[in-house]
Image (cartoon, rainbow, N blue to C red):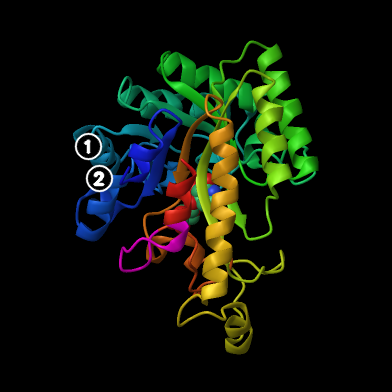
Amino acid sequence: AATLKESYDGLFRIGVALNQRQFEERDQRALKIVAAEFNSISPENALKWESVHPRPAEYRFDAADRYVAFGEKQGMQVIGHALVWHNQTPSWVFQDERGAPLTRDALLARMREHIHTVVGRYKGRIAGWDVVNEALDEDGTLRKSPWQRIIGDDYIEQAFAFAREADPSAELYYNDYSIEREAKRAGAVRLMQRLLARGVKITAIGLQGHDHLRYPSGAQQEATIRAFASLGLQVNITELDIDPLPRIADEVTAEVTLSAAATDALNPYRSGLPDAKQRELAEKYGELFAIFAKYRGTIGRVTFWGVTDGDSWLNDWPVRGRTSYPLLFDRAGARKPAYDEVLAVA
Ligand code: XIL
C-alpha cells in the first residue's frame, strides 16, 4: 500500500498532532500529508487548559472548534489532550481571588466545572480524552503537582469520574512519558491497578513515546505493552518522536540559556542529519513498529507528535534553537528513510 494509514489498516490507527496553522488549513504542505497518511489527530496545544480556559470566567473555543471541525471534515478520529496536567495550566487555577491556595473542595469544583464544560462541548465528537497527563514521577510515586498537593492522591479518579459524567461514551486515557523505564512503569501499573479496583472507567494508557536512538530498548517497549495489556487496558502510543540528537543532561531545560558554544555542541547536525544517523533513526523506527504490529489488538493507535521535522517541539526542547530530525517527513515534506522502514513493517 502507498500510505501509512492504508498499510496499517486493520492493525491500528496512525495519528498525528496538529498545530493551529495546520488544522486551520494554512499549511498546504502539511495538509496534503495529513490527509493522505493519517486517520487520527491530536491537538498539539489547542485543548490545553491555558488555551481554552485562560481566565476564571473566560473560555475560548474558537481554535478548538476549528480543530474538531477539521477532523470531522477529514473523517479522522479526533482526540482530546489534556484535561488535568501541571503544565500549560494557568496559576490562577490553584488560587482564590486573593491569590491564596484553594481548598480541596474548591479545586475539585473548579476541575469538575472545567471538565464538564470542555468535554461536554464536544460530547460525541471527540472520541477519547487524555484525562490526566504526567501524574507520575520518575521513581513511580505520584508527582507533587498542585493537583496532588491540594486535592490529594484521589484527584486522578475524580478527574476520570467527571470526564465520564460529561461524555459517557468517550474513551478515557491516562497519559505519561518514560513509562518504559522500570521504576516508573511499576508505579504506573500500581496506579492503574488502584484505579481499576475502584471501578474507574479507563480505556487505555497512553505511552507518549518521546524516544531516542537508545531508548526504549525493544525489551523495554515490549515489557511495557504487556504489563498494561495484562491489566485489560488498551495501549496507545500518543506522542511518538525519536530524537536523533545527542542526549542532553537532565538539568539543562528550556529555561536555561546556554552559551553559543554549548548550544553548538548539543546541536551538531545543523546542516542535515548524517546518513549513518538517518539509517539508525530508520532502524529504530522499524524496531519499534515491528513490536507495535505484534501487539495489534492491544495497540489502538500510534500518534506522531508533529507532521514534519520542522514542526517538532524538539527544535525548542530541552533547549531552544536545536535542529532536530525526529519524524518521518523532512522539513520540505519529503518522506525520509524512516518512513519507508515504518511502511515496510506493516
Ligand atoms: C508540547 C507542544 O508540542 C509544544 O508546542 C508546547 O510548547 C509544549 O508542549 N508532553 C505532552 C505534550 O503531553 O502536550 C507536550 O507538547 C510535549 C510533552
Q: What secondary structure is marked by label 1?
A: helix
Looking at the image, which residue is at 65% across and 38% down? 135
In this orientation, which residue lies closer to the viewer: 60 or 42? 42
State yes or no: discs 2 and 1 in contact (Cβ < 8 Å). Answer: yes
168 inside magenta stretch: no
Q: Position of residue 264 (x, y in %)?
A: 58, 84
Q: Classify 10 Å Cα crowding around label 1: few (below 14), some (14-19), many (20 and above).
A: some
The structure residue drawn at horizontal position 64% and vertical position 71%, both measured from the top left corner, is 246
Highlighted magenta segment, given as a residue range? 329-339
**Local SS, label 2:** helix
Identify residue for label 1: 74
Residue type of the residue flagged with mark 2? Ala
Q: Is residue 331 magenta?
A: yes
The response on whether ligand 1 sits within 8 Å of label 2 is: no
* In the image, residue 10 above or below residue 333: above
Q: Nearer the viewer, residue 164 or 86?
A: 164
Specify the amino acid type for callout 1: Gln
Q: Could you tell me what secondary structure mostly forms the magenta stretch?
A: loop
Residue 294 circle label: none
Q: Residue at x 53, y 36 (%)?
A: 293
Whole-percent x, y for residue 202 in the image? 57, 20
Q: Determine which quarter of the picture holds residue 267.
A: bottom right
Task: State left or right for residue 257 relative to residue 75.
Answer: right
Query: Is residue 116 visible in this depiction of the protein?
Result: yes
Between residues 138 and 14, which one lies in front from this camera angle?
14
Q: Is residue 194 left or right of residue 9?
A: right
Q: Which residue is under mark 2?
A: 35
**Does residue 153 appear anywhere in the picture?**
no
The tag earlier along the polypeptide, 2 or 1, is 2
